[in-house]
Image: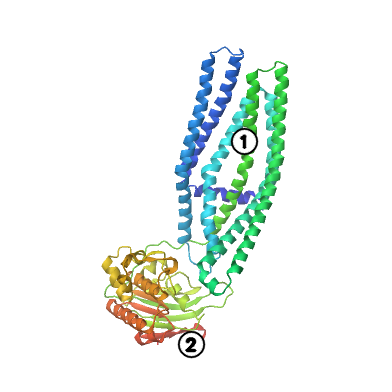
Amino acid sequence: MKIERDKLIPRLKWLWKSSEGIRTKAVLNTLMGLVQVLLDFCFIWSTKLCVDVATGVRDMALSRAVAFLVASVLGGSLLGYARNWVRSLLGAKSQNLMTLKTFTRIMKSAWTGRESLHSGDTMNRLIQDANQITTVITDTLPQLLCVLFRLVGAFIYLYTLQPRLALIMVFIAPVFLLLSRFYARRMMSLSRDIRDAESRIQMIMQENIQNRMLIKSLEQTDFIVDNLSSTQDIQVEKVRRKTRFSSVSSLIAGIGFALGYLVTFVWGVYSLNAHAITYGTMMAFVQLVGQIQGPFRSIANLLPVIISALVSTDRIRELEQVPLESDEHSIMLGSDSVPVGVRFDNVTFRYAQGDSPVLNNLNVDFKPGSLTAVLGETGAGKTTMTRLIMALLHPDSGKIVFYEPDGREVQAGPETRCNIEYVPQGNTLLSGTVRYNLMLGNMNASEEQMKAALHTACADFVLEREEGLDTICGEDGAGLSEGQAQRIAIARSLLRERKIMLLDEVTSALDMETEEQLLKNLSDRAHEHGQTVIFITHRKGVLNLCTGVLDLSEIPDNTQSEVQ
C-alpha cells in the first residue's frame, strides 16, 4: 500500500477536522515539548560552562556555573512532571471525545438494512482506531514537531562549534528520508493487515458470546474456540512479520547512528589531542551528536505510530461512507381528535441493486383510525413495510405518505418518525432497569404513567417484584422470559403516545390467554385515542380485532391491494 499524495492530503485534512475539541491538548503538549528542548540545550551549555570554568578556560565563579546547571536540571524535572500531569488529565478526556464523535456519527447515519461492516469490526474501529488517532493528534504529532525543533537547534549549536562536523552529522538525513519512504509503504500494508486481523478476532468473540446459548445447543463450543484460536494464530503471524521488518529496519538505522557517534568521538579525540578544542567543547560535541541522532531515532520510532494512525484514519473514514440521516425538525400530525393514516403510492423497494423487488409497485392505504392485520409468508415484505413506514429504508420508486382526513399530507422521512409507536420482533430490551427501558419510550414519563403502560401491556408482574420498576434486566433481557421482555417492550412503546402503532409479531412468545387480554387492551386504547394500528402477525387471534386484513402473499407481484 503506497502513501500517495492524493491519499495523504485527504487523510491529513480529515485528521485536522477531527482534531476539533482536542487541539488544546495538542498545542499545550507542543509548547511544553519545545520548552523541554530549550532546557536540554541549556543543560548542554551549562555543562560545557562548568567544565571550562573548572579547567581554567573560562573566567567565572564556579558556583555560578553550577547554579546554571542545577537550574536547567530542576527546570527539566519540573517540566517533565507537568507534562505527565497534562497527559494524564487531558488524555482520557481527548480519547473519550474522539470516541463520542465517532459513535455519534455512527448512530446518526442512515440504516441500510444490509450493513457492510460486522458490529464487532465497527466496535474495534470505534475504540481502538479512535484511540490511535487521538494519541497521534495529541501526543505523537507534538512529539514530532519537538523532535524537528531539537534537530534544527542541535545542528545550529553544533555548527557554531564545528561546522564540518555538523554537516557530516546531518548527511544522514537524505539517506534516512530515502529509506523511510520504502519503510512507510511496507509498514502501512503490514499495519492494515494487523488491524483487520484484530477486527476479525473481535467479531468472532462478540458474535459468539452473544449467541452462546445457540452454540451450546448445537454442541459446537470446541469448533468456535478452535476457530478463534486459528484466527489468533493468523494475527500473531502478521505481528511477527511486522516485528521482523521493523527490527531489521531498526538494526540498519542503529548501525548508521553508531557510525555517526564513532565519527564524532574520534574527531573530538584528535581535536582535543591537537589542542584545537577544550574538554568542555568535547563534552558538548558528544551531547550534541546525541541531540542530532536522537531526533532521527525518535522519528524512526514515531513513524510506525503515525502509519498506524493513517491506517486507523482510513478505517474510521470508511464508517463515514454511510450518509447521515436528515436532521430536519420533527413533523407531528394529528391531535386528540384527529387520527393519521399511512398510504403507499406505487412503492417499489429492493435491498440491493440487482435483487428482486421485495415490494413492487405497491399501493396500500392504512386509513386513519383503522386496525389492520398484515399477513404473508416469510419474505413477503411485512417487516420491510414497517421499516419503510419508519423511513429506516426508502423506496426505490413511489412514495409513502402520512396524512390527516382533512387532506394534509407529509411524505415519510426521519422527521415523520415522531408519529409512530413501534414494537419490533423479539427481545429488544437493553441492559439496565425496567425503569431505564421504559424511559427510552418517554424520558419525562411519570411513575404513574409507567405503571399504566405496564398494565395495558399485561406486564403487571414487574410491579409484583420486590424491586418493581428498578428490576434489573440483563443483556438481551436476561433474567426475564421472552414473553415478559416482549410485554415490557410494548409498554415502552406505549409511553410514546403517538397516533400510529406498528406491532411486529409482538404476541409470538405469549400464551393464548395473555395474548387475548393484551390484544383487547391495545384495541381499546387505539379506539380511545384514535390510533391507526398495523399488526404484522401470523396469529389468528389478531384478526378478530382488526377492521381490515392485508395478505401480501395474495397480491400478484405486490402490484395493487386494498385492505379487506
Q: Quadrant of residue 373?
A: bottom left
Dot 1 corresponds to which residue?
295
Q: Is residue 51 left or right of residue 26?
A: right
Task: Tell me, yes or no, if residue 338 can be seen here.
Answer: yes
Nearest to the eye among marks 2 and 1: give it: 1
Residue 200: % across, % down: 59, 61
Q: Quadrant of residue 280?
A: top right
Relative to 240, say whether 377 is above or below: below
How many numbered circles are shown? 2
Q: Secondary structure at mark 2?
A: helix
Residue 212: % across, % down: 52, 69
Q: Residue sitting at 61 percent across and 25 percent down?
A: 157
Relative to 68, say whether 523 is above or below: below
Q: Residue sitting at 53 percent across and 32 percent down?
A: 36
Which is nearer the eye, 519 or 210? 210
Label 2 neighbour load within 10 Å: few <14, some 14-19, many 20+: few
| CA separation in Å, label 2 and label 1 | 75 Å
Q: Give the mark nearest the N terminus, 2 or 1.
A: 1
Dot 2 corresponds to which residue?
554
Q: Is residue 336 left or right of residue 321?
A: left
Which is nearer the eye, 6 or 454? 454
